[in-house]
Amino acid sequence: MIVEKNSSEIKRENGFIVFEGVNGCGKSTARKTAARLLAEMNISAVETFEPGSGTLGGILRPLILGEKAAWRSPIAELLLFGADRAGHVTEVIKPALEENHIVLCDRYYYSTVAFQGYGRGVDLSLIKTVNDSAVAGVVPDLVLLFDLDPLIGLKRTLRRAPSESGDDSFEKEDLAFHNRIRSGYLELARTALERFVIIDASRELQVVEDAVIKVLEHYLR
Ligand code: TMP
């Protein structure tokens, strides 16, 4: 929805913005920057993330991100992320959008395409079926892709305090897996250029933060 604020300024007051990228790319920090910017502009925002938001997500997150287990397979992963997302959309995202908040979401269905599709090799058309069912038409208006060499990202995750990230077995996968994910994201961005903004996340934190603010200010105008 576009709301006229005053005669000279048009402001968008709701919308769905997603933050994506390889592990350690800085998207969670960027989401916080975005939330701060919106608060300064008196625009109400809901910050959320996948996997693990909402009632079902809270149960699923430790299971999905935990250490390797006998049940784990690429298909089981796909379906668990799908279940997490279906619950998240129904319980958190859709109600927030209906109440005219801006939703800032750390990872969404692109993560499943990148990680389970390009990373694990699950058939992309099967992923599309699961994703489409889970999101029920709730698609983002804007996707910020934080592009980074996974080697740098993984080094950053090692420097993080354990409590910041919790357990994440994906971070222990080999570099080839993470390189496939990065390529997958770039391929996704190429096929949906109208929705994606690629941000070079290898730069200094402040430079990346400024880039995020610039993109958001443009989007909100
Ligand atoms: P986080 O590090 O951003 O909290 O994300 C949790 C992990 O889950 C991260 O390693 C990426 C992975 N993931 C998938 O493999 N598929 C998905 O659909 C999502 C949302 C996350």
Image (cartoon, grey):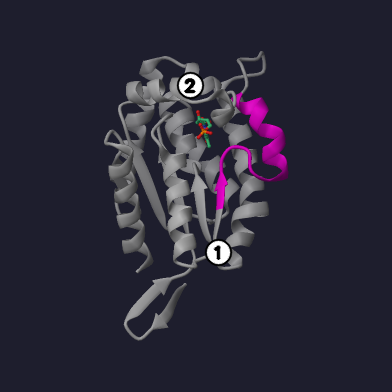
Which stretch appears magenta? 47-65
Tag 2 secondary structure: helix
Spot occupied by residue 133 in the image (x, y as percentages of width and height)? 58, 47
Rendered residue at 58%/54% (across/down):
136
Rendered residue at 50%/37% (across/down):
127
Spot occupied by residue 117 in the image (x, y as percentages of width and height)? 45, 30
Residue on which disc 1 sits = 101
Residue on which disc 2 sits = 171
91 with respect to 108 (left or right): right
Residue 51 is inside the magenta segment: yes
Amino acid type for the residue under numbered disc 2? Glu
Q: Quadrant of the C terminus?
A: bottom left
Q: Please tell me in which quadrant of the rendered image residue 60 appears.
A: top right
Q: Residues within 10 Å of mark 2 (few under 14, many from 20)?
A: some
Camera-nearest residue between 112 and 24: 24
Q: Please tell me in which quadrant of the rendered image residue 178 appears.
A: top left
Residue 86 is inside the magenta segment: no
Q: Please tell me in which quadrant of the rendered image residue 155 appears.
A: top left
